[in-house]
Image (cartoon, coloured by chain):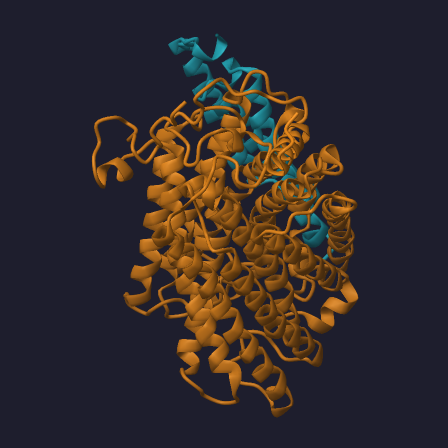
Amino acid sequence: MKENEQHILSYKTLALVLAALLVLTGLTIGVSYVHMGILNVPIALAIASTKVSFVLLYFMHLKFEGRAIKISFLCTICFLAIMISFTFWDVAYR
Amino acid sequence: MANPPSFYETPAPPGLKGIKAWLLTHDHKRLGLMYLWAILFWFVIALCVGFLLRIELATMGPTIMSARVYNSAFTLHGVIMIFLFIIPAIPAIFGNFFLPIQLGTDDVFFPRLNLLSWYLYMLGGMLAIVSLFSSGGFPDTGWTFYVPFSVGTKHNVPMTVFAAFILGMSSMLTGLNFITTVHRKRDPKMGWMQIPLFTWSLYATAWVQLLATPVISITLLLVIVERVFQVGLFDPAKGGDPILYQHLFWMYSHPAVYVMILPGMGVISEVIPTFSRKAIFGYKAIVVSSMGIAIAGSLVWAHHMYTSGMSDTAVFVFSLLTFLVAIPTAVKVFSWVSTLYKASIEMTPPLLLSLVFIYLFSVGGLTGLVLGAAGPDIHVHDTHFVVAHFHFTMFGGTGFAFFAALHYWWPKMFGILYNFRVAYIATTLTTVGFMFHYVPMFILGLQGMPRRYYDYLPQYAQGNMLAAVGGVLLFFGVMLMLANLMLSFRQRKTASANPWGGCTLEWTVPSPPPLHNFVTEPVIKDYPYDFSDVIAQIETEAKVEQGKPD
């Protein structure tokens, strides 16, 4: 069964993911000094989401999980996205 | 064939004796009962605190407590009732006990995790008790812990908030267990549209528990961070946004209302067809409405915040969404009433409690529309109208569903029946007390009396006195109901495996059930509310009584 399979990632893959995370962290700091008006938050969120995706997919092995786990995870993402976006009905129009 | 030994006589894991057989158990039924006693303990405590609050408000000025004690008392009442009673009550007790049986399996998917949930529940409760007596005393913020007050007050907010955090973990683990059990452990022959409605309601609830609880957990931790490290997250004096707290708080706490009510609706969906001897009207519509309530109910949180300074656009959007939740809720109410139509009704205490539920919950739901509409809400926001509304939904709704569940499944859990006559008297007393207690609060609220106030103006004296009289009746009604159930242990009137003529799987196993629930392989019906076998058996018994068997 798929959920019983073991996935051992190579050091090379893990190192590449770590490097990508460090680069993206640098990018986060870099863009915080650049004022892009209304795009400030979306860009910061996009970088953060990319980093989170790397962690989830590789460090937490989501990439290798079965369909039920992936769907459950996507449900939580949808829930979070709805919660955050609905809050903007307030914040964006205050 | 003699009945196999019940789960009381068979510890799991085997070899454990005495108190260890309970405290280290993996058996979902024992855990359900452990929750039962713990939750009943908290319920009685909170009921007594509520009773004292109402006595305090019976007359103007100080009656039995100071204003400071009053503030802590209503917070204590709210925290216990919400986090230690209503949220866990039906899922943790009856869900643990009956969900695996209704699914035709022997236990939940993660039995050890189930035990951990119970310990987390007990730890959360103990922390709440400790915070009563630790430095600063119990919080005076109300159960909502609104900032900036909860950040500034000298009362012991961090410990109580941490207790709520722990209780949230317990709730999440229970939800995770139920979802996994429904997916992975139900009988292979049982399709999705053969699952009983109580289990469906628990499944919908479990998703809300799993998805929404982390939001409150993190929010409560942020309150502690703000208090301890003076970080400006919510306090406007430090550059924080207090409305952000309210958003985060209600993102969980409104869906939590559905965590409270959905399992109650599941109970009613079991009781009504059983005592109507009739398939429930609109099985699929009820299933869809459960999921609909879980989803739509998660999108309406900001209707608690119309007067908080939120944008008008948000007020409009959330008001519209709030009205949408009324649709699946009404589907359920109409389905229950339609089930009763032209049914062969047999009146019993659980059915009477269910009928009271339908009435009280409908009033609670309809008054919710007054609060959900942006205009009228401005007038009644934070008044006694709100107090009456949520007690009608939470007590009249979930509370009465909990009582109905107790009376419905008591014979199955303990193998004994209680005194029906006393149960009817207690139900009537509780209902009459309830009406006298809360209807005056609607009027007081419309007249402008604020909630959470220690004292009031002379024009509110009559309504408060009437509510106090109702409160006394309500208190004694509930106590009589619980005493009647406790006395059933002394009377030991044995219950058969199926005393009500129910047709879901828990009524096919002995009362109380054996350790692994099923003695023979469970028979999964094409339709879970097919009463043809039950009716045939009743007809046969009637013929035997008349002396003319086939």
Q: Residue at x 57, y 44 (%)?
A: B263
Q: Residue at x 67, y 64 (%)?
A: B309
Q: Nearer the viewer, residue B305 or B439?
A: B439
> Is residue B383 among the parts visible in the rendering?
no
The picture quadrant where one finds residue B503 is top right
> What letter labels the chain drawn in cyan?
A
Q: Is residue B343 above or below residue B2?
A: below
> What letter labels the chain drawn in orange?
B
* Residue farthest along the front direction in this orientation: B547
On the rendered structure, is A78 left or right of B67? right
* Residue farthest along the bottom direction in this orientation: B458
The quadrant of the picture occupied by the C terminus of chain A is: bottom right
> Is residue B128 among the parts visible in the rendering?
yes
Q: Can you give x and y, in whole percent of width and height, for residue B105 in the image?
A: 48, 24
Q: Can you give x and y, in whole percent of width and height, for residue B335 in the image?
A: 75, 43
On the rendered structure, is B397 left or right of A3? right
Q: Is residue B479 above or below residue B288?
A: below
